[in-house]
Image: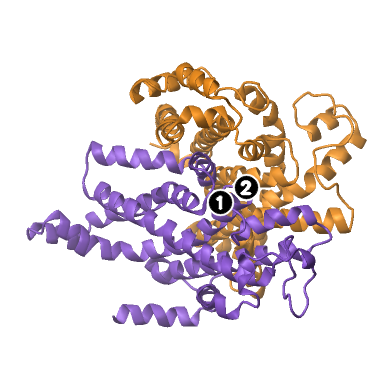
Amino acid sequence: MAALVDVLSRMARDRAVLLGAALILLLVLVAILAPLIATFPNDVWDIHPTQRLRPPDASFLFGTDRMGSDIYSRILFGARITIMVAVVAIGVSLLIGVPIGLVAGYYHGWPSDLLMRFSDIFLAVPQIVLAIAIAQTLGPSIENVILALSLTYWPWFTRLVYAETRSLKNEIFIESTIALGASPFRVIVFHILPNVSSAIIVRSSIGMGFTILTAAALGFLGLGAQPPAPEWGRMISESREYLPDAWWYALAPGLAIFLVVMGFNLVGDGLRDILDPRLRRAPKSNG
Amino acid sequence: MKLLAIILRRLVWFIPTVAGLIAIVFTVSHVIPADPARLMAGDLATPEQVAALRLQHGFDRPLIVQLGHYMLRVARGDLGTSLFTNRPIVEDLARRLPATVELTLVAMLIATSIGIPLGVICAVRRNTVLDHALRVLTVSGLAIASFWLAILLQLVFAMELGWTPLAGRIDGFAPRSVTGLFLLDALIEGELDLFGKALSHIALPAITLAVPGLATIVRFTRAGVLDALQSNFVLYQRAMGLPEWLIVWKYVLRNALISTVTQIGLLFGILMAGAVVVEAIFDWPGIGAYAFLSIYQSDYNAVMGFTLWAGSIFILVNLAVDMAHALIDPRSKAA
């Protein structure tokens, strides 16, 4: 408990982390309140051909798109898609990656080696390349994008948890717990997992940002949500036909992606500095 | 001896890693879909054509037999035939490779030549306003979607200001092919006019591609230099009265860069992943744009071919980087 308070107070003193947390909070609020704060909540589905491609003004804050729908309202609802993709993809990656990393790190022998080599193959290739192949096979939809991202992101967690577990296993407190007769399950779940959790949290935050960027790229390539879903990457790809006249069309969705990814990256970076005791001990000044 | 052992161990791992990649792509393309022949044949195929493909690829056989055949086929360099160009996919990809290599190299050049000095400056001026400002910039560089940045650059520099062409690799004739890289070929042939044209075409896509890499390099160089500044040799050199700039830019940087070399391998992955969307937006005729077209046309074989090809190149580059690392770092020669 004291540790948690310590971490929170350190976070509160770090302006970058605060900014990042504010951006994430904003995303969550926007996603929850979308029907209330959207000026045209029906414009996710409704089209108004007579008012297409209007520049931003008092009634259409970010302008209108090729169907005449209000871009501001669509961005707000797009936040729901973004959160869902990031949370589910990272959640599934955690469920696959963490147990494999724990088991492979705890036990020695060829099954562990095999598991790690298997995850290394995924890490050897850029995530988007494999995700494209999977999404193309499954067909374009947001569920398939989530699946493709989960199936390609879990090895990052495996690698991390494996390395941490291996070094923890040599710690005296783990050795003594084993010597006291604790079962492997007990050692892994109650003694190793809590000590790996801070690294997992940092990786999850950075992974959320990364996943949102990749999902937007898949949406841009046409592999994600299909129209009229207000997916941000897809909106940017639609806007290309109407440049340079409809300059506002691409501006808002791109800015939304940027701010959200920035939020997760700032929190992830800041947390790493706070939670990593090696960095905490490093001299503060010197050159 | 130790060096040779490191290189041999890396080489030995190369084959199972590529085999693993093939197995993953096989699973994606043969095991996951209910009817792979249907996907492979494309939207316009008749039931007879689908049946013929099913027989030709042996989709009725046990999966393990199919996997064996698939491995042998890929090992022979056969990635199938594109539905749209009707050419072997390997040929299509090989023809487009020089464009991607040129774009990636220029982007890497931009990222390293700006990123390394900036990283050193950040480390030396740690926790000053300058360091914080550059930190904001690098965090932004990693958060920006490359396809969005590409569109913004097009909007400003090509459409509004008219400084660069909107898209493409060159207008008119390409320089006579020596290396396949237009910039280099134009210089070899002494055609400065063509060099200028090629340069104006590559500027925007290369900058777009370089941004995330630049951010990564700044961060790693900063960390590496900070680390090296703590070493005893710096203390010694300061005590000897060596000028600070000489210590930093010569001795510290040399030590810091050893870890940056590994980063360049990772950077290559970042750049290649980014190339799919960047090439598509700038109509750059490389393998990334090929992947984009293939997705757009539901050319299933070509998408799988791209995955295998891009994956193998990436594994190969990592291998090369590991070896370079072993060669540069004198510690791996010791003992």
Q: Which one is nearer the viewer's eye here, B261 or A154?
A: A154
What residue is shown at x 52% (from left), y 61% (from top)? A209
Q: Which one is nearer the viewer's eye here, A146 or A202?
A: A146
Amino acid at pointer 2: Leu
- Same chain for mark 1 and mark 2? The answer is yes
- The residue at which mark 2 appears reads as A221
Label 1 environment density (alpha carbons within 10 Å; few <14, some 14–19, many ≥20): many
Q: How far from the left and from the top, in percent, is residue A3?
A: 32, 78
Q: How far from the left and from the top, in percent, is residue B181?
A: 76, 31
Which chain corresponds to the colour orange?
B
Drawing shade for chain A:
purple
The quarter of the rendered structure image containing the C terminus of chain B is top left
Q: CA distance from mark 1 to mark 2?
A: 8 Å
What residue is shown at x 13% (from left), y 61% (from top)? A177
Amino acid at pointer 1: Gly
What residue is shown at x 66% (from left), y 26% (from top)? B92
Q: How far from the left and from the top, in percent, is residue B204?
A: 77, 49
What residue is shown at x 39% (from left), y 69% (from top)? A275
Q: Which mark is residue A224?
A: 1
Can residue B89 be seen here? The reply is yes
The answer to the question of whether label 1 and label 2 lie on touching residues, with beta carbons closer than 8 A, is yes
Determine whether, in the image, residue B53 is placed left or right of residue A168.
right
- Most distant residue in the right direction: B193
Query: The residue marked by circle 2 belongs to what chain?
Result: A
In the rendered image, the vertical position of residue A140 relative to residue A188, given as above or below? above
Label 2 environment density (alpha carbons within 10 Å; few <14, some 14–19, many ≥20): many
